[in-house]
Amino acid sequence: MNNPRLEYHKKMIGKRVLVVQDQETQTIWEGEVVDALENDSFLIKDDDGRDRNIHIFDVRSVNMSPLSL
């Protein structure tokens, strides 16, 4: 059975994102989404080539196209 939320998150594969590693210190790094693992996590490759399992709430968009008015 296909999970609609997971299928939606898979649209992020190949996109560059910012990851907020630590909310208190605001440690931020940039990576590329490799896969959508579950409803609430992504597999993200950092610039050192390591794959990391990251919760969706810790992911931010890098590039946002201008909104149409």
Image: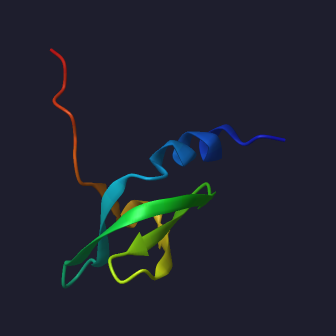
Looking at this rendering, what residue extends furthest in the top direction? 69
**Foreground residue among 58 and 65:** 65
Tell me which residue sits at (35%, 84%) in the image: 48
Quarter of the image for residue 37 reads bottom right
Tell me which residue sits at (34%, 68%) in the image: 31
In this rendering, would 51 be left or right of 31?
right
In this rendering, would 28 be left or right of 12?
left
Quarter of the image for residue 22 reads bottom left
Q: Say if 52 sits above or below 35 in the image.
A: below
- Pick the quarter of the image with the N terminus: top right
Tell me which residue sits at (72%, 42%) in the image: 3
> Which color scheme does this rendered protein use?
rainbow
Whole-percent x and y of residue 5?
A: 61, 42
Whole-percent x and y of residue 15?
A: 38, 52
Tell me which residue sits at (77%, 40%) in the image: 2
- Pick the quarter of the image with the C terminus: top left
Looking at this rendering, what residue extends furthest in the right direction? 1
Q: How many labels does the image show?
A: 0
Q: Say if 36 sits above or below 7 in the image.
A: below
Q: Say if 24 sits above or below 37 in the image.
A: below
Whole-percent x and y of residue 58?
A: 37, 66
